[in-house]
Image (spheres, rainbow, N blue to C red):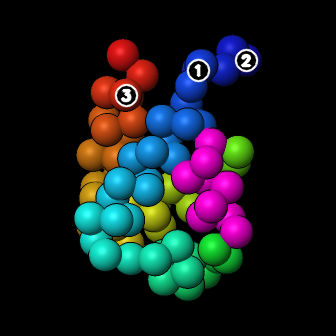
Amino acid sequence: MKKVSGLPKAFGKVIAEARTRQGLSQEQLAEAIGSTNVYISLLENGQRQPSLNATLLLARELTLTPEELVASVSALLR
């Protein structure tokens, strides 16, 4: 399967911006989704791609719908 170029970086940017808008630290977001701040850091730096489960949890904690999250990422890839 082909990979979408720039996807991990775009996803990370959206997550980092949404987290900052919510006034959450990486540690707080990680705790809310049952993960670690290292995982959040790796996501935000484009070094990891989240599972569908993690994506849904992140969207919920960042007060985004999954559709809004995907649309924001998609907009950065244009």
Q: Residue at x 31, y 35 (%)?
A: 71
Which residue is disc 2 drawn over?
Answer: 1
Q: Residues within 10 Å of mark 1 (few under 14, many from 20)?
A: few
Residue 37 magenta-drawn?
Answer: no
- Relative to 63, say whether 49 is above or below: above
**Magenta-tinted stretch:** 38-46
In what element is the residue under mark 1?
Answer: loop
Image coords of residue 8 (percent x, y): 59, 37
Which residue is disc 1 drawn over?
Answer: 4
Do residues under tags 1 and 3 come within 8 Å of each other at their CB atoms?
no
Q: Main secondary structure of the magenta part?
A: helix
Instruction: Tell us which disc is closer to us: 1 or 2.
Output: 1
Label at residue 44: none
Q: Residue at x 48, y 83 (%)?
A: 28
In what element is the residue under mark 2?
Answer: loop
Q: Residues within 10 Å of mark 3 (few under 14, many from 20)?
A: some
Q: Residues within 10 Å of mark 2 (few under 14, many from 20)?
A: few
Q: Which amino acid type corresponds to the residue marked 1 in the rendered image?
A: Val
Q: Which amino acid type corresponds to the residue marked 3 in the rendered image?
A: Leu
Q: Residue at x 45, y 64 (%)?
A: 58
